[in-house]
Amino acid sequence: MDVLTPTDSGYASNDPKQLLIADVERARAECDDLDRQIATDAERLAEIREALDTMVNAAWRDVYGQQQRMRDRENITDALSFGWTGSYRLVCAGGAIALFVGAIYALQVVGAFIALGLYVVAALVGYVVARDQCLAPVRKARASYLGADGKDVRFVAFARYEPGLNHPLIGYDGPTAGKLEDRAWKIPGVRDKDAMLETFIEVIDERRSNVLLTRFPDRKPTLVHADLENPFIRTYGVFFQRALERHLPTVEKHANDYREIVQRYGKRKELDDRLRALEAELHEFEGTAALVRSLMLPAAARDRLLRQVVLFRLGDPAVRRGLFICAGERTDLTEVAQALSRAAAATLLKISFSQIKIGYVGQGASTVARIFDQARRTRSIVFIDEADKFFASTSASQYEAMRREVEHALFKEWDALEGRTDVWVVAGASSREELDPAALAHFGVLLDFTPTGAEGDAQLTTVIGDDGAPAELPRIDVALSAPVVARNRLLAAMFAHVETMESQGIVVPRAVLIAGPSRDARQTVVNSLADQTSLPLIESSLEQFDEAIAHARSLGRALVVVDIPEYGDPGVVAHFAMALDAIADAREPIFVLACAGDAVTLDPELRLRFPELVDLTELDGPARREALHDLLGARPLDFELETAMTELEARTEGMTYDHLKQFVDEAGRRAALRAIDGGSPDHVIYALADFEPYAPPAPATKDDEAAL
């Protein structure tokens, strides 16, 4: 945790205006870098278009072949009966008969052969003409109802997903003339996160509307959409879809290249929007600053608050994790919240302990739900006043049930915001001495400017820094079960000696999932791995994962810690999964430690990216009872299991399944030792006294790792 004081914090470097100017310059530099990449993409787009045109020509030849094969018998009949002569069939047939009869009459046998030869030649010519004429309806429909005479076939790929829109998939199609065109989609029958990872093929009509859409290339080409109001699609769409399915594999590599280019174009557009917002914010900075600097706070504290307001106004992803303010007894937190709402041009919605404790059971949760529902309707700040009473580690017995109810409702509603940046959760307390660390860890930024030290200097503690690289959370170590400690030692050894391991053919995982409801336990696992490996530890959110990986690459090797929320933005989660694949494929010495409350709730596609799982999930009463039945049902006991189950459940409260196995194994060792001491080693019987809560081993250290 970074601790800053007004006297030694490097005040100038933390000036919010200078930080905003630096953000503008950084965004401009990123735009320039992307412009250089996009300039090189123009030539690649021309190659993609050429390959796509070649595939389209082959597909049209396939369509014509299908039409001809379907009409072959009819073509032969037309050729033999002079049907290809159209409305002059009778005249032509009569003339041919007269010619043949005249030849036979004049030349006898020779004339008969000549007549037969002329008929065969006429039939062959007629067959060729009839085959060509059978394609006329296809050509006419193609020219009349498809764009660019049927040649306007494009790739489609998506750069981002915005769930609040009617057409949430935002991307591009093309390339046409070396350029891409904006598209917004809502594709029925295709999951949005799947669409983010795929490239599609679309057929455009003469009005530049899509009439055929096929998903490709990450799976077998499959028809997604067909506009049956288009006459060509209604009549010949099956032919064209079959042709696409046969010829699309020839452009699979080009489709993947196209999706990469679209990602760059999408990022460039987002940077443009962000740069405009930054420049507008810089233009209005003095007015925003005047509202915050009116507060009677230390200058450094006001600047840190102002920086958070600027990030909220910009819609920065960092504000999703909220802000916790510890302001001391002499600061009016309500005044601070009002200043923040005025500076951020947001509606202030307040939740206080005194407001809720006078209600009936269930009213607190109902009030929280109503306030968050109101917050979703407009740009809002949800201010949790008297947060030390909501998030206290201990509470008066008469209010404990209500406090837990409201705390649960707060975090539930907060998680349900699904990553929105127009709702900012701010909590205020006079002190953080008795706050529950697990509740405090939900907040991304902690500003503590309570007087400390001899001169009463204010202390500013940042959990996640303004530069997007989170600082270390408070060090909290809890007891871990022996299997978890052993797993940590093994993982640490592989991370620390990755080159040696892989030279011996041992696969070292680049992604580890740490799952369990206890944030303290998850943090302990992370701390243990960092201690044993001595690798730099970088904490990040899903939205800032690219920046964290770039920082890790600059260090050479590192551990990157990411919290996976229960309700993550599908587009962000999909991008995170792709980034994990890239790290694993490149076999970089970067190891991602993903922390989640429950591995079961993770998206299955994302769960597959984690070959290693450290399960810290504590078992509840029924689950422990079931596990104890499984573990003890076949063992020799000198007591009735059902009778002793209540006591065993009490002794195992808070244990994970690994803890529970260790608990039973320890009891078995005690029973075996007693049998050996009694002279009957073949008759091991478990006694209830053998099931004593054990003292788990302490987390491993660097010395433990060095001894491996």
Image (tube, helix red, strand yellow):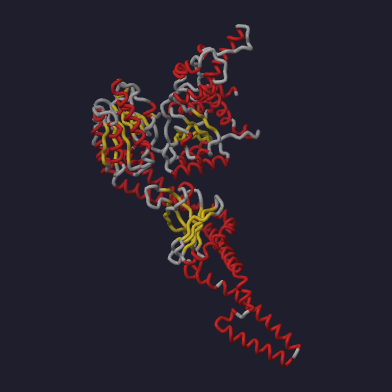
Q: Is residue 519 left or right of residue 48?
A: left
User: Taking the image as drawn, is residue 174 in sight?
Assistant: no
Which residue is at a point 44% across and 43% down the rendered structure image?
572
Q: How many marks do you count on the picture?
A: 0
State the quadrant of the C terminus: top right
Q: Nearer the viewer, residue 42 or 223?
A: 223
Q: Nearer the viewer, residue 221 or 590?
A: 221
Q: Quadrant of residue 674 in the image?
A: top right
**249 w.r.t. 513: above or below:** below
Question: From this viewpoint, which residue is outermost toward the right?
Answer: 109
* Quadrant that contains the N terminus: top left
Which sits in the foreground, 548 or 441?
441
Residue 22 occupies which quadrant of the picture? top left
Q: Quadrant of residue 463?
A: top left
Is residue 286 in sight in this rendering?
Answer: yes
Looking at the image, the residue that sits furthest to the top is 678
Percent x, y of residue 546: 47, 42
Viewer-side residue, 466 vs 318: 318
**Relative to residue 634, is residue 195 depicted above or below?**
below
The image position of residue 666, as x and y in percent, is: 54, 16
Q: Is residue 691 above or below residue 235?
A: above
Question: In x, y percent, where is residue 576?
Answer: 48, 42
Counting from the top left corner in percent of width and height, residue 448 is at 33, 28
In this view, the residue farthest toward the bottom is 106
